[in-house]
Amino acid sequence: NAGVTQTPKFRVLKTGQSMTLLCAQDMNHEYMYWYRQDPGMGLRLIHYSVGEGTTAKGEVPDGYNVSRLKKQNFLLGLESAAPSQTSVYFCASSYLGRVNGYTFGSGTRLTVV
Amino acid sequence: GQQVMQIPQYQHVQEGEDFTTYCNSSTTLSNIQWYKQRPGGHPVFLIQLVKSGEVKKQKRLTFQFGEAKKNSSLHITATQTTDVGTYFCAGLIQGAQKLVFGQGTRLTINP
């Protein structure tokens, strides 16, 4: 099993450009999450989904959109990138979000210049 | 908002010394989980505690969940260089659908 796969692993964007980060999981998990990690800030939840076709805002949702059209995929979009969105982005998934631990992807390092 | 506070933020020890990180929540938790993130890596699930007063061990790591289910600790005995990384606690607030992560404790070790 691959677990949680994130693509791309690295990306450099210019201010104002758009991009989509893809997260795919093969564990049949119901719940999926997008986090950003900045130095000294820990993990901050951007958006999450409790099932196919549903999404909800997390702690820091501004400037991001998400979609969960298929159970195994969770997409994070940046419509107009800003330097403040330079960060490492982690996707995670879990079964039911209650009993089991989260499985994290290996991350996407995004730099906005 | 609902928060999970973790201290200390940083800890530097000599190899062989013990290490402890503490986690405190403002509200009662359904469970608490612990994760380890190696430098340059991603968080990896270590363990989950569910019961009041629960204590679990993994080799040199001891995890505790407080009686009131509002605090937790991770203790590492006789640290080794392989223990280097950031340790996160994450609490599930009762009735919530997602974990609330602590800020993490970054452990560095002098060999």
Image (spheres, coloured by chain):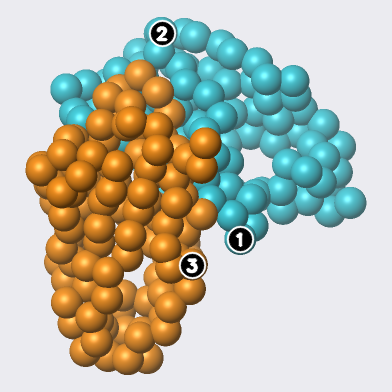
**Badge 1 is on which residue?**
B40
At x 10% / y 42%, what residue is drawn?
Answer: A54
At x 76% / y 33%, what residue is drawn?
Answer: B18
Q: Residues within 10 Å of mark 1 (few under 14, many from 20)?
A: few
Alpha-carbon distance for marks 3 and 1?
12 Å
Quarter of the picture containing the N terminus of chain B is: top left
Q: Which chain is orange?
A: A
Can residue A65 be seen here?
A: yes
Q: Which mark is residue A9?
A: 3
Q: Which residue type carries mark 3?
A: Lys
**Badge 2 is on which residue?**
B51
Select label 2 or label 1 by which is in front.
1
Q: Position of residue A106 (x, y in %)?
A: 51, 54
Image colour for chain B is: cyan
B91 to the left or right of B20: left
Q: Secondary structure at mark 2?
A: loop
Q: Position of residue B94 (x, y in %)?
A: 21, 21
A99 to the left or right of A67: right
Vertical side of A113 occupied by B53: above or below: above
